[in-house]
Amino acid sequence: MSFSDATAAVSDELAARDDIIICDSVDKWYGDFQALKGVSATIKEREVVVVLGPSGSGKSTWIRCINRLEQHQSGRIIVDGVELTNDTRNIEKIRSEVGMVFQQFNLFPHLSVIDNISLAPLWVRKRPRAEAERLASDLLERVGIPEQAEKFPGQLSGGQQQRVAIARALAMEPRIMLFDEPTSALDPEMIKEVLDVMKELAVGGMTMMVVTHEMGFAREVADRVIFMESGEIVEAGTPEHFFTDPQEDRTKLFLSQIL
Amino acid sequence: MSSELEHLARGTAELIANADEREAEDAASRPDEPSLPPLQWLKVNLFSSVLNTALTIVFGLAGVLAYQRLLNWAFSHERNWDAVRVNMRALFTFTYPSSQYGRIWVTLGIVLTLAGLSLGLSRMVGQGLSLKRISIWCMAWGGAVIAGIVLVQPHAKRSADGEILLDADFEPVRESFGTAMADRGWWWLIGVLLLATGLAIWVILGDLKRRKTFVGAIPFTLGVLAFAVSTLWWFHWGNYGQQGDIIEPGRTVKDSAKLPWTAMWFVLTGAYLVGRRISATDRAASVRVVVNLSWLLAPFITFWVILRDPQIDYAHVMSTDLPMALGFMIGGGALLFFLTKPDLGEIGRILGVGLFGIAIFNWVAAFFGIYPMLQKARISFLLLALVALAAHNFAGERAQRLRFVYAWAAVMAILHYLVTMINAPSTVDAPDEFVGGFLVTVYIAVFTMIFSFPLGVLLALGRTSTLPIFRVLSTIYIETVRGVPFITILFFFSTFLNIFLPDGMEIEQLAAAGLGFALFSAAYLAENIRGGLQAVRRGQYEASDALGLSTVQRTGFIVLPQALRVSIPPLVGATISTFKETSLLAIIGIIDFLRVANSVIPGQTVFLGVRMEGLLFVCMIYWIGAYSMSKFSQRLERHLGVGEN
């Protein structure tokens, strides 16, 4: 899908907002294998975008390119007005505005929960220790587990760990949150608690890009759904349009397999 | 800055403490298994199958035979254990003058104080020893003593002059079995006491109480040590001499050693109790940091200041050393205060790089003999440049910046103090080096570990770095050092290093050997740590990057703590190896612990050719040291959860 198509799927109300992520014909190769083929999309401020697709479609690669965990070879990615290039100062600026939550949580096992969350504000934003710890406790309350502050990641359940990971990302007060299959490694009974936190974030006005297989979440919370396959964007639209009246054959095939 | 380190240390230590919780929870939920009655235990463990029975019989017999042989050798009339007794001082401190021996005791006292404090403050407190285990030990040792009494061949008879009586075949005439058994009264007493104690515990307490009642491992060890020290007061340990050749038949080991050793025991126990007391209070964390810093300083202060007793030239100190130290403390401090301003920008990096350039120039100029400067100044300048480059990582609010500057001033003060001390000549009245015997073994081993560990970490990080220059340099260093036999490095450093250094720079032999040791050990440590680095999951790097941590912060806060935790088994192995490898110093002429037993004692006129007794004693001491380190490492691994996931 070309630049204009993905943008055209945005509703009028959203169209009035600022562009916060602009991807223009982004290509990425791993050796000879092309993981992203001319991906173009614009994410608006406070928009919640859910990226769907079969495995290997390039969804994780795409959002990892946005905070430079992967490097794109051609095309442009512009985040909050800053272009993503090899210049480390740009990368640092972008990373301080973009928070990420991983499928495997990636909490720091040798630090307590409160230290995990307060580490970045303390050393990257140079906040005083007392302020950083207060921020961390507030965030822990917000994700619903204030009593776990002194515990270590190894002592928490998967759902609790992922919520701590979300709090850790939020501690940097980012403008954008990226979620790379946040519930895929969780047992079913713990998925809800994490989705609830994400829902609350969305309602609070955070710009979110979520790669997930949770269709319920997409339907309820997303402002826009983007479907990717084999490295390119196949279709995009509002959840109502996407789930009830998909246009492309590939989209229909995918939906028939999972719904 | 120190409170952040404190916080991190606390965090890692919490992990340790929480491990105990988990262990206790696990233990509580497991069903209680009573121990097997003795006959059944034997049946299950030793005689369960035909093969098992055969192995038990074969190895049992072999063990008994070996035990008998060893004891026969040790207690034979041909043995001259006086060689070890008389030369105790020579073995441990070689030629350290008797008049200044108090310094040795002060040093030992300092080490034991720190050890006791560390043990008391430690949160690596395990369950302890169960009474079942203790009673089994008592019975086993008691049985071993009694078996020994029965197995060792009867002693040879001596004539009135003390000569060995020989029979027709020139074999020694031995007393009868009955006489031998009667003669060994003291040994019977010990054996029976041990056996009886063990049996008493076994019989009086039931199985459940035996298994569930625990005695702390450290209090138990202190108790055993107390008994050992007390033997100095009532058991005649033998004669004692001074410097090998000189024997004073009248003086016994008891006379000179009982008071200091008793004092040492009280120092250790007292420190342990104080440590325990403090660990229950709020101040525990800060005290732990102070104790650890003291451990770091202790080798330098004890060896360079206390044991060397340097003669300070106060005129020189006032005119040169003190102003230089103050200059670096205050001037450097001011510069660093400026560089830690939060929004400094490019000026910080430019200044840092500029300073680094000047520092390198100083060193290069030194090699070509131009622009002379005191070695101390060159080192301080280089340190200042390196810290200035890293200063922006410590930018923050005023209080934090001030703490950083104070830390710099403290490091400079200590560094200049120590260098002034080491440059001042020693007043200890010893022929060659002031350290010899076990003292030099500990000296080299400790200094090697202190210097090779940070260097090893840097090399490991360099070898896995993304920057080609670091990678290439580190790899060249590691592969060169690993490809060369250690002895050649020792030879090179002790003999040729001074030839390669420019005029004015000189390193004495022992320091050069220590340097070679440290550089060698660092390469091997680097490989161990690199293994640990590779065990850190990629997700940790990604999460740190996503949070915006700089590479330095990521390495220091996230990667290294996890990598080092995994590397503990090989690192402790390297420490044990270093401890034993110090015996190679003998090759370059330094009289270390092993060489005293191997060359010095057999060379003494009174003990000509007596080698094995000394060597056996040396082996025992090495074994005690290595085994303690190994046990400590096991405890550390268990509490850090190494091997679990």
Image: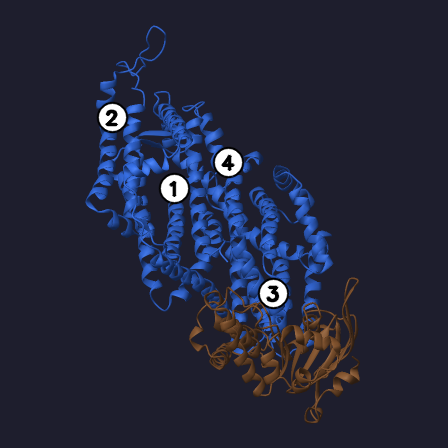
Which x, y percent locates residue B555?
A: 60, 63
Which x, y percent locates residue B373?
A: 66, 57
Labels 2 and 1 touching (C-beta < 8 A)? no
Labels 4 and 2 touching (C-beta < 8 A)? no
Q: Of the residues tagged 4 and 2, which is closer to the observer?
A: 2
Measure the C-alpha gap from mark 4 to mark 2.
39 Å
- For mark 3, does the 10 Å Cα neighbourhood hold few (<14), some (14 to 19), or many (20 or more) residues? some
Along the line of sight, which residue is nearer the eye, B165 or B119? B119
Residue B539 - label: 3
Q: Quadrant of residue B324?
A: bottom right
Total labels: the figure holds 4
- For mark 2, does the 10 Å Cα neighbourhood hold few (<14), some (14 to 19), or many (20 or more) residues? few
Q: Could you tell which of marks 4 and 3 lies nearer the N-terminus? A: 3
Residue B591 - label: 4
Labels 3 and 2 touching (C-beta < 8 A)? no
Give the secondary structure at mark 3: helix
Which x, y percent locates residue A81?
A: 72, 84
Q: Of the residues tagged 4 and 3, which is closer to the observer?
A: 3
In the rendered structure, which amino acid carries the disc numbered 4? Ile
The N terminus of chain A lies in which quarter of the figure?
Answer: bottom right
Discs 4 and 1 carry the same chain letter = yes
- For mark 1, does the 10 Å Cα neighbourhood hold few (<14), some (14 to 19), or many (20 or more) residues? few
